[in-house]
Amino acid sequence: MKSILFALAAAVLVATPVLADQALAQTKNCLSCHSIDKKIVGPAYKDVAKKYAGQKDAADKLASKIMKGGAGVWGVVPMPVNSQVNEAEAKKLAAWVLSLK
Ligand code: HEC
């Protein structure tokens, strides 16, 4: 019985990293300006993933943009500095955004 519970818990842990990163985006307030498949204030994350598909340095570039903010890639509206996000979180969020299709 114990081993069945353990197997179930392991399966849940393996199956949910995408949801975990979405929850992180939610807690960090990203989803008030972004959605996965619609433009709100900022671009849809799926469009971001498409734009950078195949670019090797995309994750680092986006992680730094997530922390520092900036404008000019998607329009004149800037993304503000997201000081609530540390470097590890920014990298996780960048990798999550790039994994969306
Ligand atoms: C106040 C609104 C706002 C918030 C909050 C916000 N963004 Fe943005 N985001 C924008 C705008 C506007 C752009 C487009 C900037 C540009 O055109 O260069 C953008 C662009 C981006 C891009 C694409 C960058 C590029 O250079 O192509 C990513 C990735 C991104 N945001 C992730 C995030 C994450 C992750 C968070 C949460 C930590 C977040 N954003 C919070 C408004 C926001």
Image: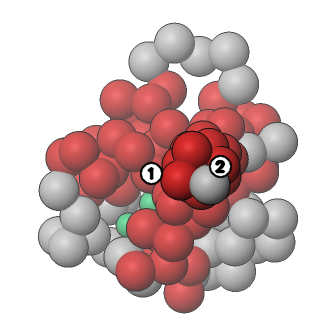
Looking at the picture, tell me which residue is in the foreground, 11 or 46: 11
Q: Amino acid at mark 2?
A: Ile
Q: Amino acid at mark 1?
A: Leu
Give the residue number, with chain letter if any, for mark 2: 4
Looking at the picture, tell me which residue is in the foreground, 3 or 39: 3
Mark 2 lies within 8 Å of ligand 1 (Cβ measured): no
Residue 7 location (% of width, % of height): 62, 44
Q: Quadrant of residue 1?
A: bottom right
| Of callouts 1 and 2, the N-terminal one | 2
Against 39, residue 99 (above or below) is above
Residue 50 location (% of width, % of height): 77, 36
Residue 16 in view here: no
45 on left or right of 10: right
Give the residue number, with chain letter if any, for mark 1: 93
Residue 65's tag is none
Tell me what residue is drawn at x 76 percent, y 51 percent.
Answer: 46
Label 1 vs label 2, nearer the camera: 2
Tell me what residue is drawn at x 62 percent, y 73 percent.
Answer: 34
As helix, strand or loop, the secondary structure at mark 2 comes to helix
Q: Check the picture and name the quadrant holding the C terminus.
A: top right
Q: CA distance from mark 1 to mark 2?
A: 32 Å
The colouring scheme, among rainbow, by chain, secondary structure or one colour, is secondary structure
Residue 21 location (% of width, % of height): 51, 58
100 on left or right of 13: right
Tell me what residue is drawn at x 59 percent, y 16 percent.
Answer: 55
Residue 27 in view here: yes
Q: Residues within 10 Å of mark 1 (few under 14, many from 20)?
A: many
Q: Residues within 10 Å of mark 2 (few under 14, many from 20)?
A: few
Mark 1 lies within 8 Å of ligand 1 (Cβ measured): yes
